[in-house]
Amino acid sequence: MKSGTGKHNTEITTLEAISKLFGAQVEFPKVMQEIVERTADRMSVNVCSIYLLEAERLVLRASCGLHEDAIGEVSLKVGEGITGHAAKEMLPVSVKAVADDPRFKLFPGIGEEEYQAMLSLPVMAEDQLFGVINVQTVDARDLENAEIAFLETIANILAMALKEKMGFNPFTTAQAQLDRAAERLQLDPNIHAILREPKRELHVSLPIRMDDGTIKVFQGFRVQYNDACGPTKGGLRFHPDETIDTVKALAAWMTWKCALMGLPLGGGKGGIICNPKEMSQGELEKLSRDYIRKIAEAIGPDKDIPAPDVYTTPQIMAWMMDEFSKLKGSYAPGVITGKPLALGGSPGREDATARGGVYIIREAAKHLSIDLEKATVAIQGYGNAGYFAASLMKELMGSKIVAVSDSRGGIYDEGGLDPKAVLEHKTKTGSVIGFPGARNVSNPELLELAVDVLIPSGLENVITVKNAGKIQAKIVAELANGPTTIAADQILFDNGVFMLPDFLCNGGGVTVSYFEWVQNLNRDQWTLETVQQRLDDKVTRGFYDVLEVYKREKDIDMRTAAYMVAVSRVVETMTLRGLPI
């Protein structure tokens, strides 16, 4: 092996060549084969291999050295063998670390080669696992630090290329979270397989005549994930970047959320790929009504009950309810929730998500002996949920809101912010930044502030392996869906951060939606006080159900505990009903 300047130049040349491979018009399997050959040559190792994650298994897709004939045939479970262990832990694993552990056979089923040195590295981008790359030598030598660093660079290059090729898939995250709980529960593999996939997907085309006279065809989805516990329930999103995988993930999370809150509902979700900011009210009404016409046979008060979500409003829900009622020939307010009060909407819906989260933060603070009247709070995301969370934490709990942010940036004032004044400033200027008397901060800076409570209420995947170790909050309360990645979860848990996972912390919204549905079925309307008291009862009970499992199991985080509670309830219902039949 070369040393000094020659070694450095060789390394740069190899990396540049590998990087350029992805810009060439070459089939991906050939690119990966070229990578392993160049890497093996550069590192002077006997074997270099790439495994890709496919359907819960790591499949050998490129190799040079001893295993070329096994490409496509050898596969490992995540957690099986050194390579599978690297994938499961999302950390590098060497043969030295597991040499005396019989669980870590090198290559089950393809030989008994003994390696003196081996290193497996996860291929990851933004905490999404794509596979594993590993190298082995048959001579008794240590892998040098420079070699390990080189392999890490190769893994990163490969990860970014795979991310661009495959894209980030939130449904993969949802499945991985379920898999973790299923392993802990020792779930029957057949039931596990059923719960990993949605029961029903609807794809519809929606041709709409626009205001300029042209016809534009929109694509819509509705996913009914699991209805073992009752009719499916979940929001409907209007978004230009909507995907079926996002809808499937959200429908899965809604399944567990309803079960965790003790609601007699299953999980559903819907979406239409559109940009409502560029559409007139007339175009939005046409789109809303046509969507209901296309899915009408699959929804109903006893089948599937949509609700508002991203960029959908009470007015849109009103149009949809009206269209369904026309199709059925009778007034059917129970088919949709999130409606205006005059059409059967429920008091307390506007701040339900934030209010439920604040009630849960209150109970978590009791468990951790944190005085919320002396606590500082930072809120990432200052939309509906973020604003109400700030207001309620200040008004109900007496906490000091020291930082808030939106998509353009954030503000910090150690003396405390007035949530209403900040909202008025944002309404006038378009952002919270520049608020008088406060210091501007970035969103990443806000997440890392030394506060007692951090409330992510905006974007997905904002807490990752890159910043999880810098989170100083004692409590992280996820009002947003999926703000923390799987790998970051473990870091927070190891650092003693108390996590209130999204489908526990933001369950207030679907709980009050459920209340609206019940009121509609009974042709009744509760008082605001009744709604808020029953919401408090529901989410508080949900918190202590999760806390009981968390304390009993001792070595799991609150997200895994919440999954264990929710999945167990769905499985019990499926078993009692005899599902699948």
Image (cartoon, helix red, strand yellow):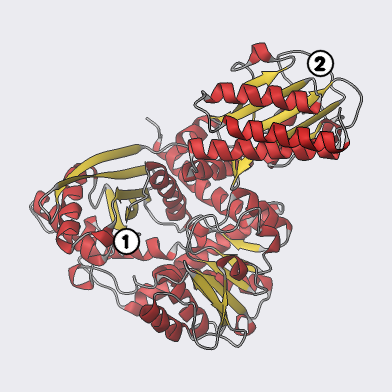
Q: What residue is shown at x 57% (from left), y 56% (from top)?
A: 484
List x then y, in percent, for residue 160. Answer: 58, 40
Q: Going by the picture, which residue comes out furthest to the right?
A: 140
List x then y, in percent, for residue 90. Answer: 68, 42
Query: Is the C-beta separation of discs 1 and 2 under 8 Å?
Result: no
Q: What residue is shown at x 73% (from left), y 56% (from top)?
A: 494
Q: Which residue is mark 2?
A: 113
Q: Earlier in the sequence, mark 1 or mark 2?
A: 2
Q: Which residue is mark 1?
A: 311
- Nearest the viewer among 277 and 41 is 41
Q: Work out whether residue 87 can be spotted.
A: no
Instruction: Identify the amino acid type marked 1.
Output: Tyr
Q: Going by the picture, which residue comes out furthest to the top?
A: 69
Screen quadrant of the N terminus: top right
List x then y, in percent, for residue 289. Answer: 16, 53
- Nearest the viewer among 480 and 573 is 480
- Nearest the viewer among 79 and 27 is 27
94, above or below 425, in the image: above
**What is the CA distance from the residue labelled 1 to the residue labelled 2?**
58 Å
Instruction: Identify the amino acid type marked 2.
Output: Glu
Picture quarter containing residue 473?
A: bottom right
438, above or below 540, in the image: below
- Side (left or right) of 474 relative to 517: right
Please give the label number shown on residue 273: none
- Side (left or right) of 393 relative to 46: left
- Nearest the viewer among 551 and 31 is 31
